[in-house]
Image (tube, grey):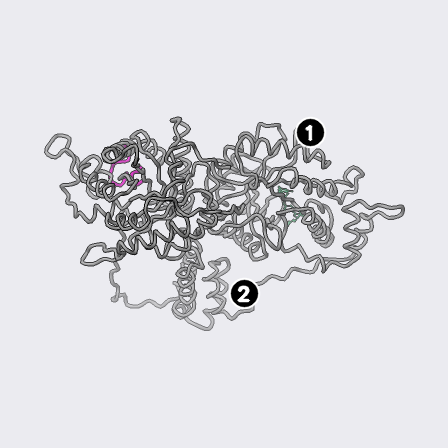
């Protein structure tokens, strides 16, 4: 549960819209600086130059930067960005300046604060924003590890705070894992230094309608709003303001923190070797009026290419007043890197796929033991197709070391599964490993009071630091709670700790009231299902806002598959009637209640509610109903009925290279290798390109398709005719060094 820190800047945001300027890099570019401008202490023994490192200007030429800051404060901006966008040691290392990260940031804050002080008055306080850019590495794609990234950002944030910066701005975010690492660094430094200044976080939505890594605005909001260190959420850079309208509208409707909007001055075009921005001051003002008056944006900013004239126009058009009041609605959710998935599903329950479980699924265990990551990804995708909304992931298995297994699996699932993940482990290091890899908002399975408060008080800080939700099991020092009374007692205790002490949002707490199998028939377990249903009903009343979850298959352990399917379905139905929100199930095994024969249904209900009579034991009767009955084989959708060219094209689109050799052999019987590549495989890639361009396919899946293409071409290569080799040309590909797109 976020509560705003008591800070004058945040109080000020509630009263009046704040104008802030951040086009430091593009303004510097328009000055056409020369190599000389980047030389510090020229002509002395200390002479040192780092050309094209804007942050170095804080040392070499602060006057130039101060000219920029002054231009925007003069135009009426309440806040201006420091020159520190790329001042983290990952980027500075490219200039040999990594070990001076802290110093450069401290200086960056001091250099802007000097100008801020020229303008700031008690009636009109001005602010300095310490900008913190994404750097050049994408942790979700494995370019850099969480710990290294956090350490790098900590240096930057420490320096900015030491230099007296007013507000931190984690901006132009492209990868939510990078974003979360930067925010974790802010939280660390606050704790370490005993200070708390406001934090703005702002993501960049590309022309695809998502962040570079494929996250849509809802996914970003879900992941970021779960972090207490975040005070303001927004969007910046990328498209011009017109391309931002829908994303700002989404934030306006859902985001409970103040909103920040800082468009570029349109998409830059290159004219005569100069970046040229088409937006006019009138357009800039018009769009900001929409953002402020229609959507209620609290901070109106400008990113690359915006000019003092634009700020003058916007301030004249909008004035110094409060933005429109908003009434945002919280939608309790989890998220993957790509999408946000609400806990409460309108016409269903939240389906948590159970099959990625080393103790619960033989198929998965075999894949895990064989280290077959592609196979595990395929199992994840199967469950997606079967209707799962999120996926439970448990690598716990006797005799194996869970952390490396989780590292490998979560390392691929984070980009290869569109569904949010539930990290299911009894081992704290396994949970921590997973959280450090995950850019989305995960669900942690689970917290409990098995060893009193020892473990829960170690897990909760992790859960809060990474902005996860948590499943709580009703287990205490005495064991798994058996009666509704006992279950509720444990639930109240956990609530007190998780919500009361650690500030978890109540809706991010999912209580699992647990049930024992009904299949054993022991006298003392006969009423357990009933107690569970009663506890689900009561917890929703006694602890308002919390959600409930259940591992449904537990109820039927020990029965044969056909019987399990019926009992699971009926028990799930009863639990949903009692108010259950989510269930860990095998999605394809849940059947609609109306397809269950009447006698099976009635007997299952008798079993659940322990309606034994003389000469009638529902358990015995239930078992009898399935004697000699076997489950029909599940029908699997596959490509094998398609003609071979279709099969290959579809494989490229699906990014599925497992067993592609056989399909290629098939194809080679009727066509030559080049035809396969040029007509069929490339046709698949063309479709991938279209899906990507229209925002329907995210980058990591495109990479998966490319990998499949590579595998296919490598296989076909020996079948290609050699030409004389005289036609070899040269290809030159270039990208811009140090640019944020330099991936
Ligand atoms: N609550 C919470 N988490 C949980 C559980 C729970 N996590 C683990 C488990 N229980 C839920 N997961 C499973 C996974 C598989 C099965 C049951 C629960 C299962 N497997 C079949 C079997 O064992 O017969 C299939 C075996 C196979 O495919 O090889 O039933 O309760 N919070």
Query: How much space separates mark 1 and mark 2, taking CA atoms?
Result: 52 Å
Residue 742 image label: none
**Which residue occupies the foreground of this view, 59 or 314?**
314
Residue furthest right in the image:
614
- Mark 2: few, some, or many residues within 10 Å (few <14, many ≥20)? few
Lower sequence index among marks 1 and 2: 1
Across and down, in percent, residue 598 comes to 78, 58
Instruction: Specify the quadrant of the image occupied by residue 171.
Output: top left
Residue 478 image label: 1
The reply, left or right, for residue 678 in relation to residue 521 is left
Q: Foreground mark, 1 or 2?
A: 1
Q: Is residue 148 visible?
A: no
Q: Is residue 92 magenta?
A: yes
- According to the picture, the residue beneath numbered tag 2 turns out to be 639
Q: Element under label 2?
A: loop
Q: Is residue 83 magenta?
A: no
**Which residue occupies the foreground of this view, 226 or 452?**
226
Across and down, in percent, residue 682 comes to 40, 66
In this picture, which residue range is highlighted in magenta? 87-99
């Amino acid at each position: 549960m976020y509560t705003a820190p008591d800070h004058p800047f945040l109080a000020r945001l509630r009263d009046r819209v704040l104008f802030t300027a951040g086009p430091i890099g593009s303004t510097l570019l328009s000055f056409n600086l020369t190599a000389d401008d980047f030389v510090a202490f020229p002509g002395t023994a200390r002479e040192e130059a780092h050309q094209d490192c804007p942050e170095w200007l804080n040392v070499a030429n602060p006057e130039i930067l101060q000219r920029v800051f002054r231009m925007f404060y003069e135009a009426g901006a309440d806040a201006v960005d420091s020159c520190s966008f790329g001042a983290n040691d990952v980027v500075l290392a490219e200039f040999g300046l990594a070990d001076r990260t802290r110093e450069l940031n401290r200086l960056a804050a001091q250099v802007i604060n000097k100008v801020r002080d020229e303008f700031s008055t008690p009636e009109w306080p001005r602010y300095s924003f310490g900008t913190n850019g994404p750097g050049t590495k994408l942790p979700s794609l494995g370019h850099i590890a969480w710990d290294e990234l956090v350490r790098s950002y900590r240096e930057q944030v420490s320096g900015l705070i030491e230099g007296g910066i007013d507000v931190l701005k984690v901006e132009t975010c492209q990868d939510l894992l990078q974003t979360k690492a930067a925010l974790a660094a802010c939280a660390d430094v606050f704790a370490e230094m005993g200070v708390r200044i406001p934090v703005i976080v702002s993501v960049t939505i590309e022309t695809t309608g998502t962040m570079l890594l494929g996250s849509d605005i809802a996914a970003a909001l879900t992941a970021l709003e779960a972090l207490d260190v975040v005070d303001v959420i927004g969007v910046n850079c990328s498209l011009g303001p017109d391309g931002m309208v829908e994303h700002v509208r989404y934030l306006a409707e859902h985001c409970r923190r103040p909103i920040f909007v800082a468009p570029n001055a349109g998409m830059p075009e290159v004219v005569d070797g100069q970046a040229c921005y088409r937006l006019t001051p009138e357009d800039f003002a018009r769009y900001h009026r929409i953002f402020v008056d229609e959507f209620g944006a609290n901070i109106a900013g400008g990113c690359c290419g915006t000019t003092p004239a634009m700020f003058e126009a916007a301030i004249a058009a909008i004035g110094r007043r409060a933005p429109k009041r908003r009434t945002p609605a919280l939608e309790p959710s989890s998220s993957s890197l790509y999408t946000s998935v609400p806990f409460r599903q309108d016409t269903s329950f939240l389906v948590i796929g159970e099959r990625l479980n080393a103790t619960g699924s033989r198929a998965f265990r075999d894949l895990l033991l064989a280290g077959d990551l592609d196979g595990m990804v395929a199992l994840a995708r199967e469950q997606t197709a079967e209707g799962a909304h999120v996926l439970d992931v448990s690598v716990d298995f006797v005799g194996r070391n869970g952390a490396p297994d989780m590292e490998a699996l979560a390392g691929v699932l984070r980009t290869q599964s569109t569904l949010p993940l539930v990290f299911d482990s009894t081992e704290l290091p396994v949970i921590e490993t997973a959280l450090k890899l995950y850019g989305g908002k995960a669900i942690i399975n689970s917290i409990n009071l098995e060893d009193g408060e020892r473990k829960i008080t170690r897990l909760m800080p992790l859960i809060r630091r990474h902005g996860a939700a948590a499943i709580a099991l009703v287990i205490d020092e005495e064991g798994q709670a058996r009666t509704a009374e006992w279950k509720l007692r444990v639930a109240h205790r956990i609530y007190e700790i998780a919500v009361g002490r650690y500030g978890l949002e109540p809706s991010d707490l999912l209580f699992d009231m647990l049930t024992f199998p009904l299949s054993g028939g022991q006298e003392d377990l006969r009423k357990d299902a009933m107690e569970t249903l009663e506890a689900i009903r009561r917890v929703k009343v006694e602890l308002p806002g919390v959600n409930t979850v259940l591992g449904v298959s537990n109820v039927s352990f020990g029965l044969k598959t056909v019987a399990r399917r019926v009992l699971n379905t009926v028990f799930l139905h009863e639990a949903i009637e009692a108010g259950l929100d989510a269930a860990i199930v095998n999605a394809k095994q849940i059947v609609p209640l109306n397809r269950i024969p009447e006698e099976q249904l009635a007997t299952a209900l008798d079993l659940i509610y322990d309606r034994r009579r003389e000469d009638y034991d529902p358990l015995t009767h239930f078992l009898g109903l399935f004697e000699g009955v076997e489950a029909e084989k599940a029908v699997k959708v596959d490509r094998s009925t398609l003609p071979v060219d279709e099969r290959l094209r579809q494989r490229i689109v699906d990014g599925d290279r497992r067993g592609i050799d056989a399909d290629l052999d098939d194809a080679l019987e009727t066509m030559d290798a080049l035809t396969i590549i040029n007509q069929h495989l490339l046709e698949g890639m063309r479709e991938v390109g279209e899906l990507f361009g229209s925002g329907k396919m995210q980058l990591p899946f495109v990479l998966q398709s490319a990998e499949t293409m590579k595998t296919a071409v490598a296989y076909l290569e020996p079948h290609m005719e050699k030409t004389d080799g005289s036609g070899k040309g040269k290809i030159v590909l270039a990208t811009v060094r140090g640019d944020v797109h330099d991936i």
